[in-house]
Amino acid sequence: MKRRIYFFLKRAFDIIVSFIGLVVSSPVWLIAVIGIEISDPGPIFYKAKRIGKDNKEFVMWKFRSMRVPKKESEKSEASFKADTNRIFPFGELCRRLKIDELPQLINIFCGTMSIVGPRPAAVDQVVIMRAGKYNIASTVKPGLTGPAAIYDYIYGDSVEDLEDYKRLVLPTRLALEAYYPENMGVFFDIKMIWYTAVCILASVFGKKPDKIYKELTECVADIREDVFQEANI
């Protein structure tokens, strides 16, 4: 019964917050549209194919932060890391301030995503991101933010080499994706939203939120190796 009430409140919260967010952030949308067109003329939005709840495919909206790929091979997302050579200057700013994620408020309002949850998996990454028992992440709606997304923002984005990312970042990220469905709740969701705001502000002022990083890594320290082995990374 408590679980049903929680999911009801979560959906109501998602609808209200995403609607308010769309209205309040509308000036930022205008700035983003102008900035993208000036920095790299082309499509404003990037429509990404993602895997969400119950492993169903949906389209996730983002502001485009990378130059349009010239080769078919550049379109793959299986590398886990963005091709930094394709990120244009204004796109880099959008990524750092998470402005590129704002269009996902549309996904949240429509019900394919939630404010807090595991990050949606790319279609060509799902065999790793939802491997074995860690497929538990697919039992809830993917989120705009969450423990794995925060960890990746604090630490993962700073690891540029793909192999280093797989070895140093991905095991903990996978563990945190699986951690959320087993620990989700009203207060945990509020904490994740607060942590997200703190992390963005810390990035603006050039500081690292060490306490948040430590808390996230310690809460899954005992299962990171299991994730690493089961995913065959």
Image (cartoon, rainbow, N blue to C red):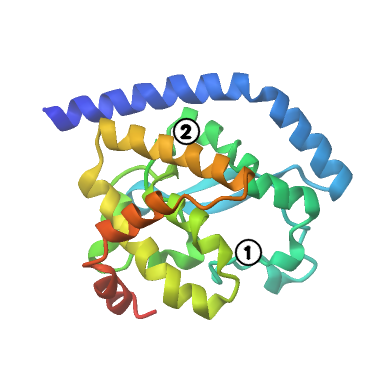
Q: Position of residue 180 (x, y in %)?
A: 29, 48
* Three-letter residue code for mark 2: Ile
Q: Position of residue 126 (x, y in %)?
A: 42, 64
Q: At x 77% / y 32%, what residue is drawn?
A: 31
Q: Nearer the viewer, residue 156 or 11?
A: 156
Sequence-first disc among 2 and 1: 1
* Three-letter residue code for mark 1: Ala
Q: Position of residue 118 (x, y in %)?
A: 38, 49
Q: Is residue 95 left or right of residue 115?
A: right
Helix, strand or loop for disc 2:
helix
Q: Nearer the viewer, residue 138 or 192?
A: 192
Label disc, if present, on residue 82 of the rendered structure: 1
Indicate the quadrant where residue 172 lies: bottom left
User: Badge 2, how many Cα within 10 Å: few under 14, some, many 20+?
Assistant: many
Q: Is residue 211 left or right of residue 81?
A: left
Q: At x 62% / y 44%, what residue is drawn?
A: 205
Closer mark to the observer between disc 2 and disc 1: 1
User: Badge 1, how many Cα within 10 Å: few under 14, some, many 20+?
Assistant: some
Tag 2 near tag 1, CB within 8 Å: no
Q: Is residue 67 left or right of residue 207?
A: right
Q: Is residue 61 left or right of residue 38?
A: left
Q: Quadrant of the C terminus?
A: bottom left
Q: Is residue 177 above or below residue 77?
A: above
Q: Position of residue 101 (x, y in %)?
A: 59, 42
Q: Is residue 228 above or below residue 208?
A: below
Label disc, if present, on residue 108 of the rendered structure: 2
Q: At x 75% / y 67%, what residue is drawn?
A: 85
